[in-house]
Image: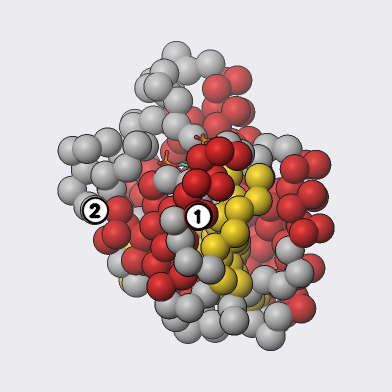
Amino acid sequence: MKTVLITGAYRGLGFEVARQLADRGWKVIVTARKVKQGSTAAAEIKNASFLELDVLDDSSVANVAKQVPQLNALVNNAAIIAENDQDILTIRPELVARTIAANALGALRVSQAFVPLLLKSSVGRIVNVSSGAGQLSDMGTWSPAYAVSKATLNALTCLLAATLKDKGIAVNSVCPGWCRTEMGGQSAPRSIEEGAAGIVWLASDAPQERTGLFWRDREVIPW
Ligand code: NDP
């Protein structure tokens, strides 16, 4: 049975990715920094277990890595967006740093911890849940800290993909589109199910040789 670990998975897109992969017969490790919410969420999914994981915390990540015996896919989904993330001319650089720490360096920390395990499976995948907001080719003014964090995450995708290319691990970024989650808000055009589908595809069915790319709706989009 294939195993996937998903960060920030007690709600929103992470939870739905967990649910969809479980429906396809995957063993799912739901992780979250909130223990009560995380274990409740995992209990709602068949073949799912829960582990406490804060992507900002080295020891939390190391502790989870010790408990996972086998892994085929890692979905770096956890992210934040601050309410006062509004104007590049006035935003406090510390807020930009905090957002990069959660959204990009968190994914790096977790990836570093799990690459050794992914290398042991015949084919491994890392899916970095990014955003069109991080596209350098289409950078607007919206949520500058979040945009910089997702552009940073995309750079990490390229670096990890190049490093792992000949080692059987595909690393990709994916934009789920604007979805009705706590982060996306209720006026977003997409359902959680639609947003999760592209992430699930990259974690499971996408051609293994496609790596180092940015995707939306199963199509490559510009960085
Ligand atoms: P949610 O806000 O619903 O979920 C984000 C999850 O990340 C929460 O479970 C949150 O948990 C968790 N998280 C945040 N910080 C940490 C941390 N340090 N350690 C562990 N977990 C953490 O958002 P979505 O489901 O909408 O977003 C999922 C992904 O999709 C994100 O990467 C987001 O940037 C991306 N995305 C979403 C879009 C949308 O329209 N919804 C559009 C484009 C991209 P906690 O309560 O503990 O903070």
Q: Is residue 64 visible?
A: yes
The picture places residue 134, in percent across and down from the top left corner, at: 43, 45
Query: Residue at position x 45%, y 32% from top?
Result: 81
Count of numbered circles in the view = 2
Of mark 2 and mark 1, the one earlier in the sequence is 1
Q: Quadrant of residue 52?
A: top right
Q: Position of residue 149 (x, y in %)?
A: 53, 39
Circle 2 packing at 10 Å, graded few (<14), some (14-19), many (20+), is some
Residue 198 vs 41, above or below: the answer is: below
Check disc 2 and give the amino acid type.
Ser
Label 2 belongs to which residue? 191
Q: Which mark is residue 134?
A: none
Q: Amino acid at mark 1?
A: Ala
Residue 35 occupies which quadrant of the picture? top right
Instruction: Give the alpha-carbon distance from disc 2 to disc 1, as whole Å.
Output: 23 Å
- For mark 1, give the secondary structure: helix
Task: Please identify the quarter of the rendering in which residue 199 is found.
Answer: bottom left
- Compare residues 100 and 88 and report the one nearer the observer: 100
Examine the rendered structure and indicate whether residue 107 appears above or below residue 35. below
Q: Secondary structure at mark 2?
A: loop
The N terminus lies in quadrant: bottom right
Residue 137 x %, y %? 38, 51
Q: Residue at x 61, y 28 (%)?
A: 97
Q: Please tell me the numbered disc located at residue 43.
A: 1
Question: Residue, x 76% and y 78% (percent of image)?
Answer: 120
Left or right of 50 in this view: 64: right
The answer to whether 165 appears left or right of 79 in the picture is: right
- Assess disc 1: are there few (<14), some (14-19) or many (≥20) residues with their C-alpha within 10 Å of its C-alpha: some
Marks 2 and 1: CB-CB under 8 Å?
A: no
